[in-house]
Structure formats: C-alpha cells, structure tokens
Image (cartoon, rainbow, N blue to C red):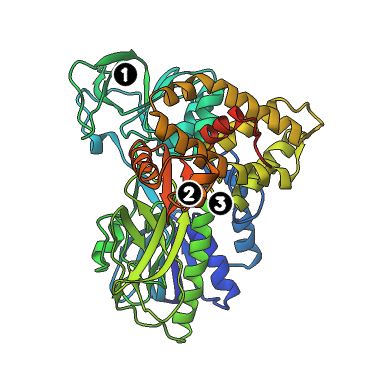
C-alpha cells in the first residue's frame, strides 16, 4: 500500500485547482486519480467561451480554462493517473482504485473529493412512453457533437432551461438543426441570464415557462413529444396538451453530485445538496476527508469551483502538516427562503465564506445572519452577476469581435440598472449591433440603445399604469423621480412631491408593494422594474443619468 499525504479523487476543475494550490502550500507527496483518459473533466467538451472571467479576468473556452490548470500541474510535476476508477474509500482514508496497471491502494493523510456531478436522466423524471433512441441528456449531446463530431438529430425539443441545455440549443442551431423550443417546468428559467440572451433570444428560440414533457412518442426512434402546461404545484393541467414532432429530445433538468463513494466512508450527506456535510474548512465529518466543487454542491460558474477548491487546499495542507483545524460545533441553520448553505458547520472563531441557494427568485433582498437572535452580518443583494465578472465579460466580448467599449462606460450601465442583468444585456446587445466593426461603442450609442428599449416597452408600461389608481400613481411617480426614496410619509417628502397626506401615502405604498410595482428594503423604496422607472421619468423629461 502506497503512502500519500493527499489523494485527490477527480481530475476536473476542482481537483486540478486543489492540486496546484496544495503544491503552492508545500505539499509534494500527492496524486490525482481521474477515471477518464484525460485530465480536464467536463470542461473538455465545453468549447464555448465565458469561462475564467472571475478566476483569470478573461473569457476562455472550457478546454482553455482546463489547460491553464493542466499546464500548472505538469509544470509542477504533480503526479496523476488517468483511466483510474476509484472503487472505494474507507473511514481511515484508504483509497482503492482500478488503474491500467492493476488494482492500487493508497493510504492518505488527507483525501480531496472532487468527482464533480452527473446529469439527472430521463429515468429520474418518470416520463411515460417507450424508450426510443433520440433522448439525450444535454451533456451527452454536447459530448457527441464536440468530442466525437456526431450530430444527435435535426428536429429538436429541449426540456429544462439549464445552462448546458440553452448552450446546446445554440450549438445545434449553428450546426443546422431546428430547435423548436425550450420548455421549463418552473415559472422562471434556471440558467444564467446571459445564456438566455445569447443562446435563445439571439437565435429566436422560444422559451416556455411552466411547461413540461408529459409523454414520449416513438418505439425505435423518437417521433415526437407531448408538452403540457403545469399549475402552481407543477402538475400537468388537463386540456393543455400539445404534440411536437421531433427526432431529438434533450434533457437539461439538473445535476446531482457524484457521491457514491461517500456512503462507504461514513460521510454524512446533506439531503438538500446531495453532497457532503462540511465545516468552514470544507472538511467532512470524517477527519482528513475534504470536499469541494460540484461533488459538494452544484455551482453556476467554474470560476467558483476553482476558488472553492483552492480554499479547500489551504485547509487540507494545514491538516496534513499538523497545524490544526479549529473544531466546528456550531450548526448553520437555514431560515425563510434559504434552501441550503455551505458550510453547514462553523467554529465561531474564524472568518469564513458562506455560500447559499435560495428557494425562489428574489429581487432587492437582504441576506441576514443571526446568532442567538442577534444580527451579526447582513448584505443587501440584487438579482445580479457581480460587477467585476460582468464588466470583464462585456469588454472582452466587444474586443473579440474587433470593437471596443470603455470599462468605465460598461460600469455606468451596470450601475444604472443596479446589476439587473436582463436589461443590461439587452442594452449591450443593441449597442454592439449599432457599433461598426473597428469602432468604439460610445455613451451616445448606449443612450440610444436605452431610449429604443424604453420606447419598445411604451405600450406595456402604459397598460400597467392604466390599472393603477391615481393616488398610487402619484406615489409611484414620486419614488421613480427619487430613485431610492426614504421617509416617504414625512412632511418633507409629501410636500416635495405634492402628495396628499401621510395616511394616503402609507395606504398607496401598501398597495404598490402588493402589486410588486415598488420594493422596500430597510425602509428605502424603489420602483421594482428599473426600465419602468426610467420610462416614468422620461414622461417628465428626465433622461437616464449616467
């Protein structure tokens, strides 16, 4: 049995990042075990760009992102074994693997779990019908096309608005297939806003929310699917069935951590994440076994996987070197609206990063951390991609297509819409189209794009206003003019906007909040839809303020 300081199970983005950081921390006696024939994991088949904005400050394809870490692994001469399938992991950190040279066993001081995740299949969905050819998970379809140069089909329906599904909608369209639509069970899309715009909107592929596949047709090869609308409880609504003729159904309905090894090792699994329960050090309940990346919880961006794995590596190195890790005895409990957190246990003695998933889509919310009923931390959040990631993405997108935009101007648009990505993306899409190749996108071009967007929504916004009583309308106008309105029942606010009385303002605010036309956070009021606020202000001759 070979002795190792660290055994890393998985050679994808999590395992590679952990290995490089462990080496930086002085750990040399380690090995990466990867079951595929090459390092890189899922990134090898993700040929689209958009990776690396957070980690490297530039937009890379999946293979480029993976190669950056593979090059570091090779440069540092970190040993790895490919085509190595880990068969078991014990509580005392014995790793058994089947390799090309036979069965190998490693006794490790620390084990890093970085196996990634797998796609939820048709079997997990229980869709009625035969089992014809032509039903693929999005990742499988992606591998067929990008790794093996095989076209899955020509008439395509996609179930689920996950990122890979939307990316495959664009990919198959570019290769000549007809993607009829993307159907999503939930009343909101599950993928990133940028993919909705770049993969669906830009190619006129419709997205139907609150819809699902209720039957599969065909015996040998798929011939069609039945689509039904679903109610608030996600149950199909009788009478809404519609059949779509197709030869390919692509499923993009969620990812599940690859956690089979965890059970044998006695590692506790969180039923909400399907990954391990970890503390602030990313250590499981089994001492010396650490977990990060998609095997721990599914991430939106690979950049976050790498950063989390690098943090894990620093803790694992301290453990191996006997520097000690603070005991974590405090449970992190989820309150209203929060589905799960990472970590689930903390020491109460050290700073730590808290990741979480919410149960629904929220805008203009506040995340609060309490201990024994006392608020210890809070953060105001909007539905937004962090500015540093988004700005780099926009600037790089223009540059790659022989155009330019000043980062400061992109930041102004981000601030104007307060990080609401849908309107930001629409603004930049139109600005890009109006910028000739070789030219710079100016503020005048951006202003024109926003003016066009406001004008195109004029009918919708007038319809909204027509259903708002006069007293509510007056308060709505006042809040829109101020942007962020405080003390709306004060005599000063009422006088400034020629309102009637504090009681009428209070009553109007309550109704506007119920209609979701305004939002209140810490007694600060704003119009929920930023573009709607701009439209209201234009009625008074006030243009968007950069």
Give the image quarter of residue 61.
Answer: top right
Q: Name the residue under label 3.
A: 386
Give the image quarter of residue 91.
Answer: bottom left
Looking at the figure, which quarter contains the C terminus?
top right
Q: Measured along the vertical axis of the image, is residue 23 above or below residue 80?
A: below
**Mark 1 vs 3, N-terminal side:** 1
* Position of residue 405 measured from the top left corner of the image (x, y, whole percent): 74, 39
Answer whether residue 350 is visible to the viewer in this image. yes
Q: Name the residue under label 2.
A: 382
* Foreground of the two, 433 or 142: 433
Task: Classify mark 1: residues with Cα within 10 Å, few (<14), some (14-19) or many (20+).
Answer: many
> In front: mark 3 or mark 2?
2
Residue most extreme to the left: 238
Task: Decide if residue 331 is on the left or right side of residue 2.
Answer: left
Task: Classify mark 2: residues with Cα within 10 Å, few (<14), some (14-19) or many (20+).
Answer: some
Answer whether residue 52 is visible to the viewer in this image. no
Q: Measured along the vertical axis of the image, is residue 105 above or below residue 101?
A: below
Q: What element carries label 3?
A: loop
* Position of residue 393 measured from the top left corner of the image (x, y, whole percent): 64, 44
- Tell me whether circle 1 and circle 2 mark residues in contact (CB < 8 Å): no
* Position of residue 511 measured from the top left corner of the image (x, y, whole percent): 34, 38
**Mark 1 vs 2, N-terminal side:** 1
Q: What element carries label 2?
A: loop
Q: Residue at 27% across / 67% down in the picture?
A: 267
Q: Mark 1 points at which residue?
A: 222
Cα gap from disc 1 to disc 3, whole angstroms: 42 Å
> In front: mark 1 or mark 3?
3
- Tell me whether circle 3 and circle 2 mark residues in contact (CB < 8 Å): no
Q: Is mark 1 on a helix, strand or loop?
A: loop
């Amino acid at each position: 049995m070979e002795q190792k300081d660290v055994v890393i199970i998985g050679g994808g983005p999590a395992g590679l990042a952990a290995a490089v950081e462990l080496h930086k921390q002085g750990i040399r006696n380690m090995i990466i075990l990867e079951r595929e024939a090459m390092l890189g994991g899922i990134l090898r088949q993700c040929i689209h760009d958009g990776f690396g904005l957070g980690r490297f400050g530039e937009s890379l394809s999946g293979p480029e992102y993976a190669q950056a870490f593979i090059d570091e692994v090779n440069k540092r001469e970190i040993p790895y074994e490919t085509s190595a399938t880990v068969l078991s992991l014990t509580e005392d950190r014995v790793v058994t693997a089947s390799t090309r040279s036979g069965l190998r066993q490693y006794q490790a001081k620390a084990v890093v779990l970085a196996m990634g995740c797998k796609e939820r299949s048709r079997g997990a969905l229980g869709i009625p019908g035969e089992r014809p050819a032509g039903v693929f998970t999005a990742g499988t379809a992606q591998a067929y096309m990008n790794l093996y140069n095989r076209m899955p089909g020509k008439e395509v329906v996609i179930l689920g608005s996950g990122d890979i599904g939307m990316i495959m909608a664009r990919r198959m369209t570019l290769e000549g297939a007809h993607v009829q639509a993307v159907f999503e069970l939930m009343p909101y899309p599950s993928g990133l806003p940028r993919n909705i715009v770049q993969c669906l909107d830009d190619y006129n592929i419709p997205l139907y929310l609150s819809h699902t596949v209720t039957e599969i047709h065909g015996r040998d090869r798929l011939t069609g699917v039945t689509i039904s609308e679903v109610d608030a409880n996600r149950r199909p609504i009788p009478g809404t069935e519609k059949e779509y003729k197709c030869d390919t159904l692509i499923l993009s309905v969620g990812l599940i951590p690859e956690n089979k090894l965890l059970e044998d090792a006695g590692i506790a699994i969180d039923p909400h994440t399907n990954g391990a329960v970890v503390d602030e050090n990313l250590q499981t309940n089994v001492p010396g076994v650490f977990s990060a990346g998609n095997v721990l919880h599914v991430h939106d961006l690979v950049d976050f996987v790498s950063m989390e794995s690098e943090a894990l590596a620093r803790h694992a190195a301290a453990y191996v070197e006997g520097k000690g890790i603070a005991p974590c005895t405090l449970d992190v409990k989820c309150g209203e609206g929060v589905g799960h957190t990472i970590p689930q246990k903390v020491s109460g003695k050290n700073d730590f990063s808290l990741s979480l998933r919410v149960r629904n889509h929220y805008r203009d919310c506040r995340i609060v951390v309490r201990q024994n009923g006392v608020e210890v931390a809070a953060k105001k959040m909007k539905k937004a991609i962090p500015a540093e990631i988004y700005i780099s993405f926009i600037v790089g997108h223009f540059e790659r297509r022989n155009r330019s935009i000043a980062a400061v101007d992109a930041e102004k648009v981000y601030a104007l819409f307060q990080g609401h990505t849908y309107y930001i993306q629409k603004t930049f899409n139109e600005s890009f189209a109006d910028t000739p190749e070789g030219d710079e996108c100016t503020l005048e071009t951006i202003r024109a794009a926003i003016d066009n967007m406001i004008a195109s929504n004029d009918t919708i916004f007038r319809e909204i206003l027509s259903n708002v009583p006069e007293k509510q309308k007056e308060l709505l106008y006042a809040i829109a003019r101020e942007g962020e309105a405080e003390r709306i029942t004060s005599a000063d606010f009422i006088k400034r906007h020629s309102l009637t009385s504090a009681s009428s303002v209070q009553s109007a605010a309550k109704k506007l909040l119920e209609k979701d036309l305004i939002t209140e956070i810490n007694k600060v009021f704003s119009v929920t839809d930023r573009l709607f606020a701009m439209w209201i202000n234009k009625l008074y001759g006030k243009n968007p303020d950069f």
